[in-house]
């Protein structure tokens, strides 16, 4: 079945506008692209003849590599541009970079940016035969991370409405938290606890329906899922950074302070992890950790999203630039 169950997906720069059925359809499509570890990856032709340009103006390991693999596994040509090797260092604007890639035939632009509002600006100004897919924007949105997180959770805990989840750490500066919470909300999850020290917690009004908790013991009580987040040093003044040893003592995930979570709770982290600060080795590499599965599921989710936008481009007459 087409991933566009109720309306076509032209761009993906946030999850806010997605309906439950549209989001579920993307997850169902991603499931079809998953292969068991050790088995050759699933391939397809949904992007045959297309060019995907990865524009990463912030560092990335997982997202960049997985978008590249996803596009190649669906038959696309792929161009990768990072800030330091692009003409943006010479002063070229993001829009001129996008126009340049469109002129070379790129019809799907994957964009990571530290600047709030740039993804929407690019969507407004890109050509009629171009789709924009966010790979993370400032502290605002990381939609494919939100999708891969809920895909990973759904594979272990299919009843998302009954789910209890604790998100631990730097929620205030986290685009992952914003997108994952949005995805869970769309899918009906109601028990979401945001756990961390006061300077790293958001305003309650930004996340209506969630519970803000200041201790790990309370936040993790009876939860099915524990998700640790990285402290986003690059988005904070150094004076506001918590002391790493204090933080690890109070909020770092260790076997002993996971005791109040359910025995079968899964442990997640979007990466990159700061071991010994947000999580210790025995938890990150332990039997309840699904952190590497999140990475694996990320390729499948990005295949589903790229295939969905390519289908929309095809149906609306958007091919390659002639
Ligand atoms: N989770 C995530 O966005 O990781 P990268 O920054 O390595 O892409």
Image (spheres, helix red, strand yellow):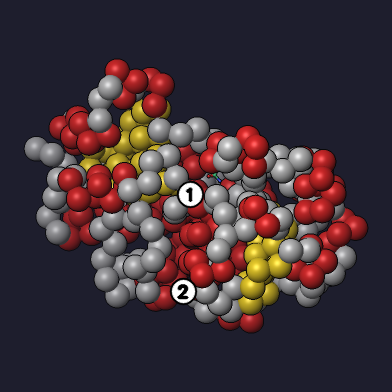
Q: Residue at x 57, y 60 (%)?
A: 202
Q: Residue at x 79, y 50 (%)?
A: 252
Which residue is disc 1 drawn over?
Answer: 139
Q: CA distance from mark 2 to mark 1?
A: 20 Å
Q: Residue at x 32, y 73 (%)?
A: 5
User: Closest to the observer: 39 or 218?
Assistant: 218
Q: Is residue 300 above or below residue 186?
A: above
Residue 186: mark in rendering = 2
Asked whether mark 2 and ligand 1 are closer than 8 Å, the reply comes as no
* Residue 249 screen position, x and y as percent: 85, 49
Q: Quadrant of ligand 1?
A: top right
* Residue 100 screen position, x and y as percent: 19, 30
* Quadrant location of the C terminus in the rendered image: top left
Left/right placement of residue 193 relative to residue 84 reads right
Left/right placement of residue 243 relative to residue 238 reads right
SS under mark 2: helix
Q: Taking the image as drawn, is residue 31 in sight?
A: no
């Amino acid at each position: 079945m087409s991933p566009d169950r109720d309306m076509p997906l032209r761009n993906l720069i946030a999850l806010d506008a997605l309906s439950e059925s549209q989001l579920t359809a993307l997850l169902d499509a991603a499931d079809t692209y998953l292969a068991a570890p050790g088995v050759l990856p699933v391939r397809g032709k949904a992007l045959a003849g297309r060019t995907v340009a990865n524009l990463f103006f912030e560092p990335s390991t997982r997202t960049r590599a997985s978008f590249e693999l996803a596009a190649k596994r669906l038959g696309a040509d792929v161009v990768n541009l990072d800030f330091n090797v692009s003409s943006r260092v010479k002063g070229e604007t993001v829009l001129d970079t996008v126009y340049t890639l469109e002129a070379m035939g790129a019809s799907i632009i994957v964009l990571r940016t530290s600047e709030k509002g740039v993804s929407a600006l690019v969507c407004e100004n890109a050509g009629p035969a171009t789709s924009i897919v966010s790979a993370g924007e400032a502290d605002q949105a990381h939609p494919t991370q939100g999708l891969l997180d809920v895909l990973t959770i759904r594979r272990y805990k299919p009843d998302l409405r009954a789910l209890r989840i604790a998100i631990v750490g730097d929620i205030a500066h986290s685009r992952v938290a914003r997108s994952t919470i949005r995805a869970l909300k769309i899918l009906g999850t109601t028990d979401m606890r945001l756990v961390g020290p006061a300077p790293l917690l958001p305003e309650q009004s930004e996340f209506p329906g969630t519970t803000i908790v200041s201790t790990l013991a309370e936040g993790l009580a009876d939860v099915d899922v524990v998700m640790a987040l990285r402290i986003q040093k690059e988005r904070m003044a150094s004076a506001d950074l918590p002391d790493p040893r204090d933080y690890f003592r109070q909020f770092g995930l260790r076997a002993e302070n996971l005791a109040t979570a359910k025995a079968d709770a899964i442990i997640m982290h979007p990466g990159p992890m700061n071991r010994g600060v947000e999580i210790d080795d025995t938890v990150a590499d332990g039997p309840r950790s699904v952190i590497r599965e999140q990475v694996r599921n990320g390729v499948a989710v990005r295949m589903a999203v790229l295939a969905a936008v390519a289908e929309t481009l095809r149906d609306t007459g958007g091919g390659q630039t002639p």
